[in-house]
Image: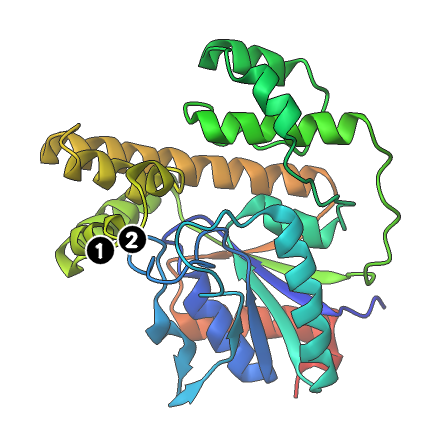
Amino acid sequence: MSIYNLITILGPTASGKTFFGANLAYKIKGEIISADSRQVYREMDLGTGKDYGDYIIHDSSIPVHLIDIHDAGYKYNLYEFQKDFFRVYEEILNRGKYPLMVGGTGMYIEAVLSKYELLNVPLNQELREKLSELTQEELIDVLHKYNSKLHNTSDLKIRKTTLRAIEIADYYSKREAQSSDLPDIRSLIFGIKYDRLSRRKRISERLEARLNEGLLDEVKLLLDKISAEDLIYYGLEYKFITLYLTGQLKYDEMFRKLEVAIHQFAKRQMTWFRRMERNGHKIYWLDGHMPIEEKLERAVKIITEEAPELII
């Protein structure tokens, strides 16, 4: 029998994976490591879905790591996440607790499960100067000429992001990957999913709720501290609400475009997870409609069969 040393809980946005993960952590006396590329930033709460209350289970606070570790405006990256993850992972094990990775950022999750061999890519001012006269379309053409799996193509409409993607691709094209001394990760993976229509309904309802809870005010406060361009960099809620607050979109247009963008994002997340399955990562999918008690019962049954040493 394979002995697992990590539990991973993944799913698209608005699937309830955080609440499920916290409940499971409570059962097995574990601690959570967040795998969310935007929850690392302080004061970006409603827009990134930091539901702090989800970590309170039966009046106990479940420890969660890699949330609120940088100020808004910082550009956290995959290399830093992988480094931070394994540092926290070892600390949790040394405390005699069990680590659970919970999140929806597929690349972050795979950087751990597949032990990506990453390099810390420095700024290349000389290259940036050579690219400074190119149009955005020409920059995209340059990026596509590199054969790199690791460059960031999440938003090619942002010039800064495209320049950084070229910089990373160029760096990797000229260097051999570093040897990896990362721990051997053997993870039991659970996924939370809904049918397409239910997923879309949950996303739309959550967006309306967060706007009512003060999401516009959150973005206004952030705009007092960082530039609109830097805030747009974070995408989704921060991109479209910034465009609204700076007069580039009307409210109804902002809401409609943002709603569509989040639906598309959730679809991309599920596509990524299905690709993970094709690449050999077995995911035990749990129906999001099930009550939390039933989800936990199913998960515990699987853990009992696959990793009984986890049941405390």
Give the residue at x 55% y 69%. Answer: 298
SS type, badge 1: helix
Relative to 38, is 271 above or below? Answer: above
Q: Type of residue at label 2?
A: Lys
**Disc 1 and disc 2: Cα gap in Å?**
7 Å
Q: Nearer the viewer, residue 57 or 124?
A: 124
Relative to 75, is 260 above or below? Answer: above
Verify CB contact (< 8 Å) between mark 1 and mark 2. yes
SS type, badge 2: loop
Q: Position of residue 49 (x, y in %)?
A: 35, 58
In this rendering, does residue 197 appear at all? no
Q: Residues within 10 Å of mark 1 (few under 14, many from 20)?
A: few
Residue 235 appears in which quarter of the rendering? top left
Q: Nearer the viewer, residue 157 or 26?
A: 157
Relative to 72, is 199 above or below? Answer: above
> Is residue 150 rendered to the left or right of residue 159?
right
Quarter of the rendering occupied by the N terminus: bottom right
Q: Type of residue at label 1?
A: Leu
Q: Which residue is mark 2?
A: 225
